Image (spheres, rainbow, N blue to C red):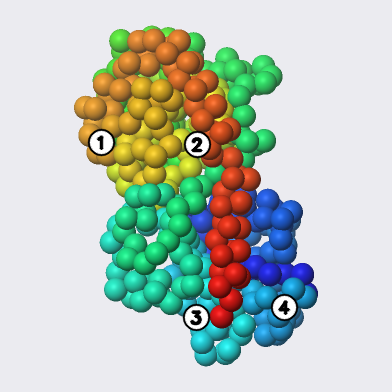
Amino acid sequence: MSRVEVIAPHFKKRLSGVTSTVVQLVPIQAARLGIATIGPGLPDTLPKLRPRQLPSLWLRPASGRKRIWHARRNVEMIAGIFLKSVLRAPLHLVFTSAAQRDHRPFTKFLIRRMEAVIATSARSGSFLEVPHQVVMHGVDLDAFHPRSEPADDFAAAGLPGKYAVGCFGRVRAQKGTDLFVDAMIALLPQYPDWTAVVTGRVTPENRAFADELKRRIAAAGLEKRILFLGEVADIKVWYRRVTLYVAPSRNEGFGLTPLEAMASATAVVASDAGAYAEMVEDGVTGAVVPAGDGAALTAAIRRYLDDPDLAKRHGEEGLVEARACFHLEREAAGIERVYDAVWARGG
């Protein structure tokens, strides 16, 4: 604990986008500064603060600086405020906001108690009423990479077709899975070389939604060409197998999947939900359409089904962009600059 200067709390058991951020970022940060996580739902490979070490929060680390408590959820802001203001732990409070909506009054109250605020995109920053820095998420370029072996080819999946178009993530209306399925029902009869692949978990509350999509597919006679694979063992290889990735969300916080596709040299058609429009350069690395607009989504996908070479070119441009602007080390460095500014102000 004498070396730990940053605490990254994680107070949610279920996997979420915040979980993914913490799991990917903390090892990068740990190579640059002393950092530990606290809370459930994280792998044991991360540096963790154990219950018996909690009293150490009231002792400053060897550097003499106050520790930074970096919250990403309301409950984590509440805990940080309680530790600092009520229990008098020597902490600085930092919050990262990914929300793409006006914050509720209580959240605004919590945010005003933070000493620094990070927005994950310009759009999320536009909903903040306090000074902030934009530090966009990055992607693990070692885990997500272009095709490098035969298993990365779509043919290795043993599915019909020459090319694949994919839509990954939880199957539900918010993610726009129905918009993707409807686009595929409209397009695939005209493009026999293409197969559509949907991966992701179906929660009990979304079972009826998924069943209705499968009913539509069956009614169109496309059960063998629009495939629901459920949760796959390794999603990374599927980004490499598809020629086109579609992110049709109606709303998002940030949304990492387009970056994961770009890092895999795969072209992207995305809605303008979340930070998608700040990642995908329309006409260069893919296409961006209005969220919830099924007709626009279908038209954008059609362009790539017509011309697989265009998808390849845009995928290659996406890889260049991901490597230049969206690698994890860049995100970690941006966050560290915020930490340094907080420490420089002292208090």
Q: Residue 259 shows which numbered tag?
A: 2
Give percent across and percent down for residue 341.
56, 65
Q: According to the image, label 3 marks what residue?
A: 81
Marks 1 and 4: which is nearer the front? 4
Q: CA gap, disc 3 to disc 2?
A: 33 Å
Find numbered disc 4 in the image and state the secondary structure of the residue it sits on. loop
Q: Nearer the viewer, residue 20 or 140?
A: 140
Find numbered disc 2 in the image and state the secondary structure of the residue it sits on. helix
Number of numbered discs present? 4
Q: According to the image, label 1 marks what residue?
A: 290
Amino acid residing under circle 4: Gly
Give percent across and percent down for residue 259.
50, 36
Q: According to the image, label 4 marks what residue?
A: 64
Amino acid residing under circle 2: Leu
Amino acid residing under circle 1: Pro
Q: CA gap, disc 4 to disc 3?
A: 21 Å
Give percent across and percent down for residue 112.
39, 74
Is residue 30 something one can see in this rendering? Answer: yes
